[in-house]
Image: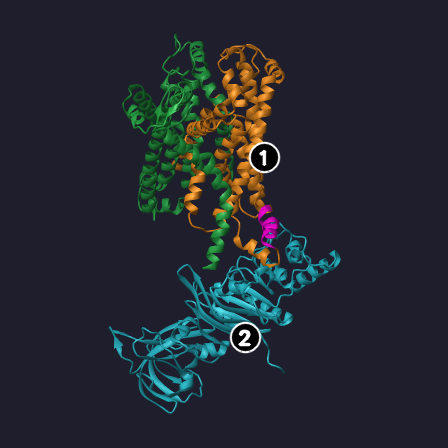
Amino acid sequence: MTKPKAMIECRDVHKYYGDYHALRGIDLTIKGGEFFSLLGPSGCGKTTLLRTIAGFEDISSGVVLIDDREMGDVPANKRPTNMVFQSYAIFPHLTVAENVAFGLRRDPRGKAEKAAAVDEALAMVGLKGYGARSAHALSGGQRQRVALARALILKPKVLLLDEPLSALDRKMREQMQVELIKLQRQVGITFVLVTHDQEEALVMSDRIAVMFEGEIAQLDGPEALYARPATRRVADFIGVMNFLPAHIVADIGGIVTVDVPGLGQVQLPHSQVSRANEDDEGAMIGFRPETMTLVGAGATHNQPRETNATIDEVVYYGDMTYYDLRLDGVARTDGKSRTVRISMRNVFGRDVQEVGTRTRLAWSPGSLVLFR
Amino acid sequence: MSNHSKGRGLQAYAVLYLLFLYAPILLLPIFAFNSGTIIAFPLQGFTTEWFAQMWGNATLRRALTNSLTIAVSASVLATCLGVFATRASTRFSFPGRGGMMGFIMLPMVLPEIIVAMSLLVVLLGMGVQLSLLTVILGHALICMPYAIAILSTAFSSLDRSLEEAAFDLGETKWGAFRLITLPLVMPGIISSLLISFTISLDEFIIAFFLAGNEPTLPTYIFSQLRFPRSIPVIMALGTVLVILSVVLLAIGEYFRRRGNARIGGAPTGGLL
Amino acid sequence: MARFDAEARAGLSLIAPPFLYALVILAAPLLTILAYSFLTDGYLEIIRDFTWDNYVQVMTDPIVRVVMTRSLIVAMVVTAVTVVLAFPVAYYVSFVVRPERKSLWLFLITIPFWTSYLIRVFLWKVILGYNGVVNSSLTGLGIIDEPLTFILYNVNSIVITLAHAYAPFAILPIFVTLEKIDRSLLEAGRDLGESRAMTFWRVTLPLAMPGVLAAVLIVFIPTIGDYVTPEVIGGGKIPMIANMIQVQMLALDNRPLGSALAVTAMLIVAVISVTFLFLNRRFLKVRQ
């Protein structure tokens, strides 16, 4: 199998609005057929980047290539991209079919062929038979589908999606996530999604670029992004991570030895070392709540190390229970002790433990990330 | 309980207030159909003679033609200029936008006599012959702020990504404007035309000073108010004008609401 | 930067036609009368000598002073009467009328405004006149023996007529600000133990102030420059500033003095407008 070719390439892309530096040197390659997400908090430049790819914003410097063609002077209506807008931008004065057929106006095909294409596109998004309906009478989910059909009927090389699920309620959103993944597999074109919802990005994407303040902080697959966040900031943004202060003892031969109050001494390879925030005081050890196991009450584990702890708080979620633990040996600051959060699946035969219980926590050095 | 009585008191007041607003207008048809030549109570008898006289009056017909010519031209001109200004101010940011828009809206807060007098002085100074055209120019100027106020509601309620979507789907910028923006703001444009038309039709001061010897409806009415003999005909004319205004306003309101319904918005607010 | 320039260019080229139109039809004439106001009036022509004389005359001439004072007082009284009478109506439509009926009420309020101004003014003369509706009804009913004269051909009748003419101008801006008031604020006021009247005084009224100030401005400006009402109701015997400008400009052909009067009137309007806009800004700031 040949390596998939690059569909979109951004090389050192900068964008200024007056004095405001919105994009600060974006370097990015998105492969053909990939489901790619731009993830970040509002104002991080993700939408601006998407709009520069679409051609709605000129770039101040740098190069954008789509399918090996430089896009410098190519306006949005001549680019091989189509967009699904955050508001869906369904034309309210047209019917569903007229909306979907909008981009075919300059298509030389005959009326019947175009109508067939519209029917096909509507069927693809699950709106068969909706063609004659008036667009403003549609529900949010239906508008979303019309927007998808309207873009996909033009067979673009890239489909750009600007926060497409943010206006839907939770249930509809989860359903559309699955449908979008299926649709992308079916049509096989490159999808570029902008979202501020880390869960959505993790669920849907082949790869994710996390952006802060106009820069890409990390570009990785979902698992790598979650397990090995490149910076403390990425770790904070995606999911929940516990942090404990750490003292670096030695850094020899690609292995860092750290002393972590509460956990003891651990040796970590450089692959488990990430960058701390600039304002952090000293190094930090981070780990995800579900990577550690509470020993006892019927739980089994095969993790090599154990630590003594006291249960400080229990939050019961039905399928999960969250425990806030005070690890022995973690210094108290300002009279309050630093707790770590552990999540346990409530499987059959395992009891929920009570506040104040003395317990042990089992863990593996492989699940730790050192930020320094 | 107290809420109820408060509502009652206010309602009674509001109804009285409406009576005060409508008092003069309600008198119009009464005197228009009254056979007495003096505008006073008690009423004499029923007649339609004043309407017949009105119909047969050549000067009045000329005034009507003039007024219609002026109102149609001025409303079209004001609305066209208003579309340019509104599109510029709602869609683009550029240096001096606030100042320029403020200046264009200035006639709304400038006493009309000053607009009329200064324009008259310049036109006379330049030796320009006063005509319907000079009235049209003045009327378009004072109608433009109202047109912009109405058009702004229509343009700014438009989702900017609609036009971008059309552009993204392969249309040219002009195609996107023509196929998407224009149909969606059309109700606003029609409202703007109707309101400008109504303002121009009723405008007196500019028409009085800038029309030269040509009569318009308001200047004709003004000239006749001095002659008690002509008053009943003026009452008949007033009745017709009131009905015409109400019909035009109702049409304008209908289009405004249809425009709202079309883009799925709720019908709120009034004409201004 | 390129993008910003392209956008600015598009905006500027769009606004150019209406802006140029306003420049030619409005700015040029206004600048002309400003220039005229510093020139000297000669017989049949204007002498191109710079002078302050016209303004000195505007400031010192007793007739000008009477007319200016009258215009100001009439405009102030009309504004006060109109706004005070209009507020309860705006309040009623905003707070009491059911939402689906609000458009109808606004429609009813605006209709009279769109009917011939001249005829409305004239009808007030009919209503208030010596043998008018009020007097003939009252004498007919035997309530009075002699027709009332205090409502006739004087400043009172001008005030009544103008207050009627600009009523919707006062109602609409107040209504719009009342509509914007978050109703839960009023409930909060009541919840915190304020009486209904105190809630109105301490919550509703301050929040409605921007609308009231807008109403004041929007009524004051056209009333101070009104030409028709003094002409029709007062029969030309009680002129206001607009009538005086017209007489100087045309009948007496003293354009420099007429121009100075017009410029002075504009200055008065401008000073009052700026004052009210400033007050409005203070109120808006308090709101935030």
The answer to whether residue A67 is visible is: yes
> Splitting the image into 4 quarters, where does residue B243 fall?
top right
Image quadrant where one finds the N terminus of chain A: bottom right
Quick one: SS at disc 2? loop
Q: Which residue is mark 2?
A: A206
Q: Colour of chain B?
A: orange
Which segment did they paint magenta? B172-182
Residue B147 x, y percent position in the rendering: 51, 38
Q: Kindly indicate whether the residues beneath marks 2 and 1 are on one polypeptide chain.
A: no
The answer to whether residue C88 is visible is: no
Residue C156 x, y percent position in the rendering: 36, 19
**For the residue marked with disc 2, what is the amino acid?**
Asp
Q: Colour of chain C?
A: green
Residue A157 x, y percent position in the rendering: 61, 68
Label 2, residues with CA under 10 Å away: few <14, some 14-19, many ≥20 = some
Q: Which residue extends farthest bottom? A: A253
**For the residue marked with disc 1, what is the amino acid?**
Ile
Circle 1 chain: B
Q: Nearer the viewer, residue A7 or C201?
A: A7
> Splitting the image into 4 quarters, where does residue C274 fall?
top left
Residue A57 is left or right of residue A112, and the answer is: left
| Majority secondary structure in the magenta region | helix
The numbered disc on residue B251 is 1
Which chain is drawn using cyan? A
Residue A152 is left or right of residue C248, and the answer is: right
Residue B29 x, y percent position in the rendering: 55, 19
> Splitting the image into 4 quarters, where does residue A262 fall?
bottom left
Q: Nearer the viewer, residue A60 or A328?
A: A60
- How far apart marks 2 and 1 lie (CA) works out to 56 Å
Asked if B108 appears above or below C247 in the picture, the reply is below
Q: Are marks 2 and 1 in contact (CB under 8 Å)?
A: no
